[in-house]
Image (cartoon, rainbow, N blue to C red):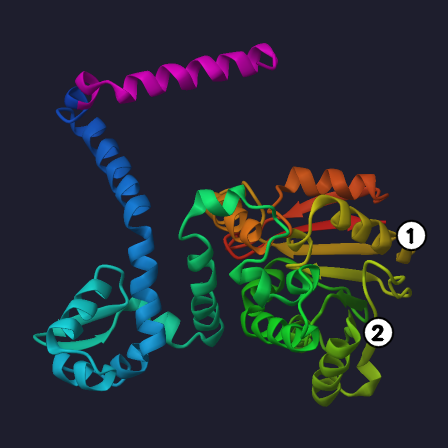
Amino acid sequence: MTRGSPKDSWKVRYVAHRNRVFANPRFQYWAAKLPLIRRIAKTRAGEAFDLVAGFTYSQILRAYVESGLFDVLATGPVSHRRVAAELELSEEAAKTLLRAGRPLALSEEPIADGWMLGESGAVLAADMGAQAMIRHHRLLYRDLADPLELLRKDRKEPTELSRYWSYAGALHGAAERGQETSEYSQLMAASQHFVADQVLASFTFPQSARLLDVGGGHGAFLSRMGEAFPSLQLGLFDLPEVAQQGAQVLTDRFGNERVSAHPGNFFEDPIPTGYDIVSLVRILHDHDDEPASRLLANIRASLAPGGRLLIAEPMARAPGAQGMGEAFFGLYLWAMGSGRARSVEEISAMLRKAGFSKTRSIATPQPVNASIIVASA
């Protein structure tokens, strides 16, 4: 056992004692009798049940998305018979699905057998990016059917996710790299607003600044920044087949004078110079430590003194979003065969090692979607 500081030893003793107390049947009986402790115990029991039922919840959501039930309920109130006919289900199956979505706020029955969208359902029905991600997660569920088998595999062995994503597919020798790259970029474009919203709410670009988005795909992030900051100059760096398409999207919207496209590989080719800010949007956590460190060093070499790197992605141990980092993305990226979620402290250490002079973390309204780190050259 590795010896730590006295403070660490105190923490270990505290956790061990707490666990012994919580596991004691007499304590559980006693806790059920006291109002304050009973409320805490009830909350913990609910959290434990959600751990057990979580897969069922996700599959209910998947059924709503893949069946088109959101669209049917948007015309509501509708009867369960109407839902059964639209979804080609039996009437009992339709009622079961509608009732299953009710406690998840996907559906609601304001009048007898008059079904409409619930609060969460209304939000998801209008969010095509979220629906695209929900459909995509069927691949993750297949890989996680036996989580221990997945964890025992060599990370370079193909999985459902690694076959889908272009860069992981390339690592496993996928034959149709261009097609997979296109699919990857389309899904990223559909969901990119999750991160873009957090950047817009938390970070202000200087007037007439030059922004280069590394791994910018079809330009979804740059499009949002360009609309919000009309004087911002936009640069996109990505693989040639992606950069060409992204540049066309951006120039159609903003004109040639605001847009520059740079085809290349951000591991092998120099990062274009002359930019005030370089952004990495949901890129760093997709790569293992060694290539991620090389990417950061490559970006640092491109920045003049005073230049900045903006990293925006879900991060591990983010207050209020702990489950998203090490639980969801921990297993997601393992199944993908590349990358891991990192904490602010871990990323900051990598940035200092890459040669950045200082880093700062910027709070976002919804860290479940993204946290932000800005590093100065």
Which residue is pictured at 83% across the width and 45% down the height? 356
Left or right of 329? Residue 95 is left
Give the x, y percent position of residue 322: 48, 43
Q: Confirm whether the magenta stretch covers residue 27.
A: yes
Give the x, y percent position of residue 6: 57, 10
Which residue is pictured at 86% across the width and 65% down the height? 275
Give the x, y percent position of residue 145: 40, 53
* Direction top: furthest residue: 6
Name the residue carrying label 2.
262
Q: Nearer the viewer, mark 1 or mark 2?
A: 2
Give the x, y percent position of residue 289: 72, 44
Residue 221 lies, with reference to residue 172, above or below; the image says below
Q: Residue 260 appears in which quarter of the rendering?
A: bottom right
Contact, CB < 8 Å: mark 1 with mark 2? no
Residue 326 lies, with reference to residue 191, above or below; the image says above
Q: Residue 241 appears in which quarter of the rendering?
A: bottom right
Which residue is pictured at 75% across the width and 41% down the height? 350
Mark 1 to mark 2 CA distance (whole Å): 22 Å
Name the residue carrying label 1.
305
Left or right of 9? Residue 346 is right
Q: Residue 370 appears in which quarter of the rendering?
A: bottom right
Q: Confirm whether the magenta stretch covers residue 223.
A: no
Kindly report the secondary structure that dominates the magenta region of the rendered protein. Answer: helix
Q: Is residue 320 visible?
A: no
Disc 1 residue crowd, few under 14, some 14–19, many 20+, Cα 10 Å: few
Tell me which segment is drawn in magenta: 1-28
Mark 1 or mark 2: which comes first in sequence? 2
Question: What type is the residue that disc 1 sits on?
Answer: Pro
Left or right of 150? Residue 249 is right
Which residue is pictured at 77% across the width and 44% down the height? 351
**Camera-nearest residue between 233 and 252:** 252
